[in-house]
Image (cartoon, grey):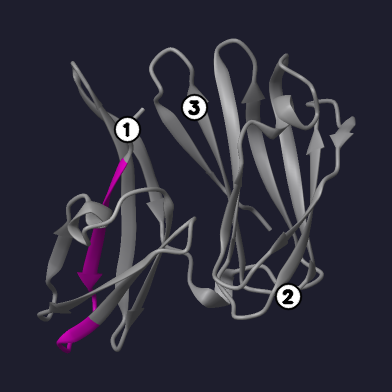
């Protein structure tokens, strides 16, 4: 798969908005772009990472002086067109803090599907998270902990298989508890092995 991301910004305020788009790749490379939006204007930044002259996976942060709606679509291209997933922006005040537990339902790891789990630390403090993986009947399969540096994103590739050792999960789930730090945003991506079509699973409190 070759993934790319389109970022959409919608100025819902009654004023001109100046938004700064900040990209941080998983290897630490950064890039910025300033976007000025007229009242009520919506702007799509197609393949936003490539537009910054960068490559790789990472995270996007949008900082605006006016209320702006941000969403993105990460997608692949094939012979029959594109396929991908919508990923909504998460406001800072909707992230998980120390003591919070978030849930990721509908996870699958078998011959037809694979699941990845991502954890983003949107704060400027180092965070520690406790990830617990479960079968559909509630049996705990593994419980790794991870340290996430400030503004860092980590992605666990197929943890149900590579950490829990299971490739027969039709309906598992995961929880993530923030043990220290804050500003934590968690997601899962369930990918169809035949088509590489992904489904976003946002965190639930």
Residue at image coords 78%, 26%? 136
Q: Residue furthest right?
A: 139
Which quadrant is the C terminus positioned in? bottom right
Q: Quadrant of residue 148?
A: bottom right
Give the mark, 1 or 2, whose residue is nearer the N terminus: 1
Give the mark, 3 or 1, whose residue is nearer the N terminus: 1
Prevailing secondary structure of the magenta residues: strand
Which quadrant is the N terminus positioned in? top left
Give the mark, 3 or 2, whose residue is nearer the N terminus: 2
Name the residue nearer the viewer: 50 or 203.
Answer: 50
User: 145 left or right of 169?
Assistant: right
Residue at image coords 14%, 64%? 43
Name the residue nearer the viewer: 60 or 84.
Answer: 60
The residue carrying mark 1 is 2
The residue carrying mark 2 is 181
Q: Quadrant of residue 77?
A: top left
Element marked by disc 3: strand
Magenta residues span: 4-18
User: Separation of disc 3 and disc 2 at Cα?
Assistant: 30 Å
Graded by Cα atoms within 10 Å as few (under 14), some (14 to 19) or many (20 or more), the crowding at tag 1 reads: few
The residue carrying mark 3 is 191
* Residue 164 in sight in this render: yes
Contact, mark 3 vs mark 1 (Cβ under 8 Å): no
Q: Quadrant of residue 139?
A: top right
User: 152 left or right of 2?
Assistant: right
């Amino acid at each position: 798969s070759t993934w790319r991301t389109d970022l959409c910004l919608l100025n819902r305020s009654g004023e001109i908005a100046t938004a700064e788009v900040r990209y941080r790749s998983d290897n630490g490379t950064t890039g910025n772009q300033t976007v000025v939006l007229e009242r009520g204007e919506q702007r799509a930044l197609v393949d936003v990472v490539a537009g910054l002259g960068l490559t790789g996976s990472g995270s996007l942060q949008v900082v605006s002086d006016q209320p702006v709606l941000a969403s993105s679509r990460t997608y692949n291209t094939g012979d029959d067109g594109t396929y991908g997933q919508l990923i909504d922006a998460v406001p800072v005040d909707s992230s998980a803090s120390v003591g919070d537990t978030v849930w990721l339902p509908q996870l699958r790891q078998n011959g037809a599907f694979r699941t990845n789990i991502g954890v983003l630390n949107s704060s400027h403090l180092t965070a520690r998270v406790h990830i617990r993986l479960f079968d559909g009947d509630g049996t705990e399969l593994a419980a790794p902990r991870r340290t996430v540096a400030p503004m860092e994103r980590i992605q666990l590739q197929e943890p149900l298989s590579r950490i829990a050792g299971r490739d027969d999960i039709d309906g598992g789930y995961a929880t993530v508890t923030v043990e220290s730090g804050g500003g934590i945003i968690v997601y899962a991506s369930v990918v169809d092995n035949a088509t590489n079509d992904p489904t976003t699973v946002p965190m639930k409190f």
